Image (cartoon, rainbow, N blue to C red):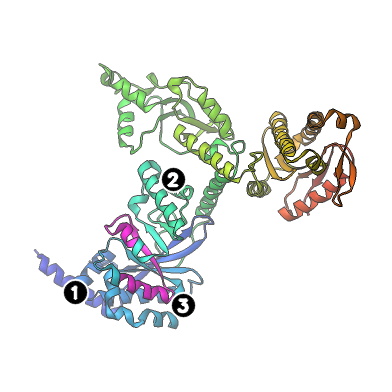
């Protein structure tokens, strides 16, 4: 039997063999931009010889510390990682792991890495040194001065394993890194743990305020990825995205598509209105059970969860019931609850009439339905179906989070006068519609002769007209359009985006309502005259007609070649034609592609 001393001796010989023969294999794991799905950087990892007792990097570096040759091993790993990446790295970053103790070694200060980079036609700005938070730092003053020296040479610094060690925020404050890499312990199952989400969200907010990019390590599931994108994480790394490979490989188109979709959903929530966000955009996936499932299995499932969830009952893809976790525990707590329900099918106590909604139902409509339920069911999860089949669930907590977030974002981007979304939201919605396959209509609304009214009656009266116009437009669209977006461009200009089949009806109803309701804003004398007297731009008194409304409408059937710029130009031409007619009117222009 070989003792510990014998094992250490063998490992020492193995290490010397590895160093002498350069038996290190670098592997590279992509670090991915969680907005675009593009690879931002690669982390270089090192492996010992296949089949060796020092194959794994932890054992390899532990042996190097024991043999007091950490610098030699570190330089070998670093140089091989750089040389193997030379031809493929292009403008991407290369993350290199460095033990904090190496930074104190005189050998590290001799510019060996910089010289080697030059030989490989690479620049120091492409290199990011990863310093693990797990490593103890004894003297922050010296440590900070060493790192500052490297940052002055255009090397970048990342704190690795953040949240796993004991240096914590102190290390973060002392070294001012360009990147923070969150430890896998903060990322694993984050979609199931509210405390983890809160911690990561706080770190994201701090990092962005400090101009630090944040990277999530150890992403292994789609649900983790989607939540991290929602929380605003900049970059991601993990087996779900791509495993470490000996070559610098791209990630799959499928993963890129998932990232883009998740980020697009985040943007929808950030910029859209409740009328346009469908409930399917915010679902979570969770385990389901058949109605025949015995109670003890449900109990084991609930105990395994870090955060309680309602139990969704599905038979052959169709949702047939829901079991509120609190009600289930209450039933079990009765005198004979355990014996009655543990070995009997769950259909005996499930709610057979859960709130089930279609994927395309708006969040606003779902919220209204949820709040109209009986009090005992008020907090049950909402079941979402697509094509009649179970698709996912939305908790009341999630629904409230999203509606609150949307309203706060809407308020931030909205016109302070009318409360309607402003130009940022307008632009985003137009871009979103241009990306979709469905045709749509855009109505540019302009109030004619508003300036004359505003000058004659005063700004306060003018503001009342704009508020009334916004209300009129919203009420008309609510009544005649199934789905729509309404925004306030500024002044007396508004914009509506609707489905093409209701364009004519909506436009006519807007005109009828406007012509009827705007009369009350004039004095009886002006109403009788059908004009007002106001100064023109040269301060001459002129006669101006009462306010009318011009609607420049573009019906977009095909999207090829159209941009926001030529859409605005086209609308300007139509609006000019509308305003040439001295009564409220609309003109529809059909755009069928270039």
Report the Cα–Cα distance between label 2 and label 1. 43 Å
Quarter of the image for the C terminus: give it.
Answer: bottom right
Label 3: few (<14), some (14–19) or many (≥20) C-alpha neighbours in 10 Å: many
Could you tell me if the residues under marks 2 and 1 are in contact, i.e. CB atoms within 8 Å?
no
Q: Which of pointers 2 and 1 lies earlier in the amino acid sequence? A: 1
x then y, percent, for residue 389: 52, 32
Query: Mark 3 — residue?
Result: 122
Q: Which residues are magenta?
A: 143-172
Q: Looking at the rendered structure, which numbered label has been put on residue 67?
A: 1
Residue at the spot x=38%, y=20% of the render? 349
**Can residue 237 be seen from the camera position used here?**
no
Q: Which of pointers 3 and 2 lies earlier in the amino acid sequence? A: 3
Q: Which of pointers 1 and 3 lies earlier in the amino acid sequence? A: 1
Farthest top residue in view: 335
Q: Is residue 563 left or right of residue 120?
A: right
Residue at the spot x=89%, y=33% of the render? 530
x then y, percent, for residue 508: 81, 33
Asked whether 349 falls inside the magenta stretch, the response is no
Q: Looking at the rendered structure, which numbered label has been put on residue 204?
A: none
Vertically, is 210 above or below 435?
below
x then y, percent, for residue 45: 35, 66
Quarter of the image for the N terminus: give it.
Answer: bottom left
Could you tell me if the residues under marks 3 and 2 are in contact, i.e. CB atoms within 8 Å?
no
**Helix, strand or loop status at disc 1:** loop
**Can residue 549 be seen from the camera position used here?**
yes
Query: Mark 2 — residue?
Result: 223
Q: Is residue 395 left or right of residue 14?
A: right
């Amino acid at each position: 039997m070989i003792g510990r001393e014998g094992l250490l001796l063998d490992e020492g010989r193995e290490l010397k063999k590895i160093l002498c023969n350069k038996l290190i294999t670098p592997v590279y794991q992509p670090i991915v931009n969680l907005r675009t799905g593009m690879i931002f950087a690669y982390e270089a990892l090192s492996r010992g010889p296949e089949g060796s007792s020092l194959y794994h990097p932890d054992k390899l570096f532990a042996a190097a510390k024991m043999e007091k040759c950490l610098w030699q091993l570190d330089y070998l790993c670093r140089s091989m990682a750089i040389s193997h990446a030379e031809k493929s790295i292009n403008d991407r970053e290369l993350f290199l792991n460095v033990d904090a103790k190496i930074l104190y070694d005189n050998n590290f200060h001799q510019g060996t890495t910089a010289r080697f980079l030059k030989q490989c036609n690479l620049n120091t700005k492409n290199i990011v040194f990863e310093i693990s938070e797990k490593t103890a730092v004894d003297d922050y003053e010296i440590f900070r001065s060493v790192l500052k020296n490297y940052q002055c040479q255009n090397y970048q610094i990342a704190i690795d394993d953040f949240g796993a060690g004991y240096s914590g925020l102190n290390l973060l404050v002392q070294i001012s890194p360009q990147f923070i890499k969150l430890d896998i312990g903060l990322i694993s199952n984050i979609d199931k743990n509210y405390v983890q989400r809160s911690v990561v969200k706080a770190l994201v907010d701090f990092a962005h305020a400090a101009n630090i990019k944040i990277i999530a390590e150890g992403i292994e599931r789609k649900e983790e990825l989607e939540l991290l994108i929602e929380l605003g994480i900049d970059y991601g790394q993990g087996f779900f995205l791509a495993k470490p490979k000996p070559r610098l490989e791209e990630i799959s188109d499928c993963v890129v598509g998932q990232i883009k979709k998740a980020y697009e959903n985040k943007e929808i929530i950030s910029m859209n209105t409740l009328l346009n966000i469908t409930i399917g955009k915010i679902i979570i996936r969770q385990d389901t059970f058949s109605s025949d499932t015995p109670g003890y299995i449900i109990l084991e499932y609930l105990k395994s969860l870090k955060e309680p969830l309602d139990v969704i009952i599905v038979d052959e893809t169709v949702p047939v019931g829901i079991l509120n976790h609190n009600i289930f525990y209450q039933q079990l707590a009765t005198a004979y609850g355990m014996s009655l329900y543990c070995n009997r099918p769950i259909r005996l106590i499930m709610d057979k009439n859960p709130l089930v909604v279609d994927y395309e139902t708006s969040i606003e409509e779902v919220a209204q339905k949820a709040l109209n339920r009986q009090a005992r069911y008020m907090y049950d999860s909402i079941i979402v179906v697509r094509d009649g089949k179970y698709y996912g669930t939305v908790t009341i907590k999630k629904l409230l989070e999203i509606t609150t977030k949307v309203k706060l974002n809407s308020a931030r981007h909205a016109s302070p006068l009318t409360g309607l979304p402003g130009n940022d939201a307008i632009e985003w919605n137009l871009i979103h519609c241009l990306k979709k396959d469905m045709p749509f209509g855009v109505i540019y609304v302009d109030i004619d002769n508003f300036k004359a009214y505003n000058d004659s009656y005063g700004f306060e009266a003018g503001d009342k007209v704009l508020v009334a116009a916004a209300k009129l437009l919203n009420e008309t669209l609510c009544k005649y359009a199934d789905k729509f977006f309404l925004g306030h461009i500024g002044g007396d200009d508004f914009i509506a985006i609707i489905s093409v089949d209701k364009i004519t009806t909506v436009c006519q109803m807007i005109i009828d309502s406007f012509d009827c309701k705007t009369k009350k804003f004039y004095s009886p004398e002006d109403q009788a005259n059908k004009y007002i007297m106001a100064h023109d731009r040269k301060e001459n008194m002129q006669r101006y007609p009462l306010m009318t409304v011009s609607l420049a409408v573009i019906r977009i059937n095909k999207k090829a070649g159209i941009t926001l710029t030529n859409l605005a130009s086209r609308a300007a031409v139509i609006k000019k034609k509308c305003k040439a007619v001295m009564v409220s009117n609309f003109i529809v222009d059909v755009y069928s592609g270039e």
